[in-house]
Image (cartoon, grey):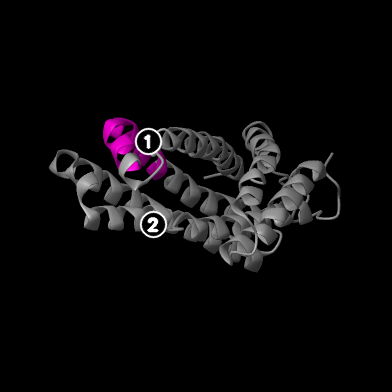
Amino acid sequence: MTQRAEARLAGYTYLGYIVFAMSAAVLSSKTTGGADTSQMLATLRSTIWIARVTVLLDLLQIACAVVLAVTLYRLSKVVDATLALIAMGFRFGEGLLGFLPLLGKLELMKLATDSNGLCAASPGCLAVASEIFKRPDDLFGQFCFVVGGFLFAYLLLAGRLIPRWMAWTGVITIGLQLICVPLYVATILPGKVVNWLWFPILLYEVPLGLWLIRKGVRETAESAPGKVLS
């Protein structure tokens, strides 16, 4: 595969990743509404087909993370092969860790539909469901995302592979989350702050996806790394 084709694939994958992730988040919010665990399971049971769609979207998101890990490594290794390999490892880890919240979702779907919803009246079943709802399975994938995403943004900036303003946007927005996500995992920072800081990253990833599709990366980055891309 040529560098241009790899860049185009990365661009389409970036946009697909965003669509799948946001669609899954919006739909998931409709499947777990309720004041307590029993009501949340009842909501999940009544919207089980929506939940099944979110499972498919989650799988597509995992696939996108793996594709981005490989393509971004191929595009940025001319700048620093070691850092690019580390970044690829984290983005690949993000994809693998994406199965953790997916498994939890499948467990909840099974509890909500088993015995025609009788689980909602069982204390033991409710305790298991409550534990799954509270489990921070997605935090580990988020940590891998911000580490890998920051390193790739830095490599794109250092190699002048994309416009500097775009690369700097990625370094700053993902860099903020690189600080905040570990603090949230350690329960030092409230989740609301982290949740809001995901949106500025779209100012980097959407233009980047479109740029990679239309322009690709600077093919002469290895031979002339000091020239600023306009």
Looking at the picture, does residue 79 appear above or below residue 169?
below
Q: Percent x, y for residue 30? A: 41, 32
User: Are the residues tagged 2 and 1 within 8 Å (C-beta)?
Assistant: no
- Residue 31, label in figure: 1
Q: Percent x, y for residue 56? A: 35, 38
Q: In this view, does 82 lie to the left or right of 220?
A: left
Residue drawn at the location 72% of the way across and 54% of the way down:
176
The overriding secondary structure of the stretch rendered in magenta is helix
Q: Which of marks 2 and 1 is in front?
A: 1
- Residue 148, label in figure: none
Viewer-side residue, 154 vs 161: 154
Q: In this view, does 89 lie to the left or right of 213?
A: left
Mark 1 element type? loop
Q: Mark 2 points at which residue?
A: 100
Label 2 – label 1 distance at C-alpha: 18 Å
Q: Percent x, y for residue 169? A: 76, 45
How crowded pointer 2 is (Cα within 10 Å; few <14, some 14-19, many 20+) is rated as some
Viewer-side residue, 203 vs 46: 46
Viewer-side residue, 219 vs 187: 187
* Quadrant of the image occupied by residue 28: top left
Q: What residue type is labelled 1?
A: Thr
Mark 2 element type? helix
Q: Percent x, y for residue 93? A: 48, 61
The stretch of residues the image draws in magenta is: 40-59
Along the polypeptide, which appears first: circle 2 or circle 1?
1
Would residue 226 be seen by someone viewing this image from the given angle? yes
Q: How many labels does the image show?
A: 2
Residue drawn at the location 49% of the way across and 49% of the way down:
65
